[in-house]
Amino acid sequence: MSIDLEMSTPISRRQLFRVGLGDLRSLVTTESAGEAPPVYRPPGAGRDEAAFLQSCQRCGACVAACPYDVIKTFGPASGILEGTPYLVPETDPCRWCPEMPCIESCPSGSLAHGESGGVPPVAKVRLDLDACLTSEGILCDTCSHFCPESIGAIRMVRRVPVLDTDRCVGCGMCVHYCESEKQPFSLEPLPEPL
């Protein structure tokens, strides 16, 4: 689940006094840039951001339960998002643990298994073969190697990666480990599920 933050996230006076200099600088930079980056929620958050913000107790249980320390929480500069969990798939990919300790630890049900018992994607990934090393004749299977085995969204076909968007959960493992240095990168998370 991801959201696009609005340019003006309301901040209370109490939050403003707790904002550190680094947070204040990023807040001013974000405001002047005019566009905030997308926010990716942990597994099980679902697509209804308003419902998530209302039900999340901001207790940090999912953060503490994550064995890889990839779930972060927003600070006071984030206004109404303060204390809520988020992911940064490009730099700290979700490992998509089979037992989903983040979901199991959530006391409010803000993070939950879907109706079918599965876990909905946190995002999707876009694959640009023109930016892929294989387009240069370089043998590389890093993305398929790091895609969690239980997901299997990327497989190699004739030495070229093929992305199955139906299976992709947006964990970011392929994005994080991609060896391509072209801009834009060959793999990137999308702010909204396909």
Image (tube, rainbow, N blue to C red):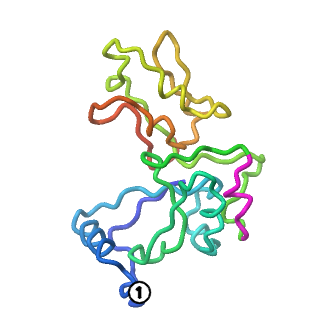
Is 174 or 39 nearer to us in this picture?
174
Q: Is residue 128 above or below residue 111?
A: above
Q: Where does the image place residue 133, in percent across and percent down from the top left?
A: 35, 21
What residue lies at 37% left-to-right and 31% top-to-bottom? 186
Q: Is residue 134 above or below residue 38?
A: above
In the drawing, does residue 34 fall left or right of residue 189?
left
Q: Where does the image place residue 34, in percent across and percent down from the top left?
A: 26, 64
> Residue 130's image quarter?
top left
Q: Report the number of numbered marks.
A: 1
Looking at the rendered structure, the kind of residue marked 1 is: Ser
What residue lies at 33% left-to-right and 72% top-to-bottom? 23
Is 185 or 46 nearer to us in this picture?
185
> Residue 13's image quarter?
bottom left
Please rate how many residues cluster around mark 1, counting C-alpha atoms within 10 Å: few if below 14, some from 14 to 19, many from 20.
Answer: few
Task: Confirm whether the magenta stretch covers residue 29.
Answer: no
Q: Quadrant of the N terminus?
A: bottom right
In the image, the segment drawn in magenta is 99-107
Is 142 or 111 nearer to us in this picture?
142
Is 32 or 23 nearer to us in this picture?
23
What residue lies at 58% left-to-right and 61% top-to-bottom? 48
| Residue tagged 1 | 12
Q: Where does the image place residue 14, in percent across and percent down from the top left?
A: 42, 90
Q: Where does the image place residue 3, in percent across and percent down from the top left?
A: 47, 58
Residue furthest toward the top? 158
> Residue 31's image quarter?
bottom left
Q: Is residue 77 above or below residue 147?
A: below
What residue lies at 43% left-to-right and 47% top-to-bottom? 91
In the drawing, does residue 144 fall left or right of residue 29?
right
Residue furthest toward the left? 32
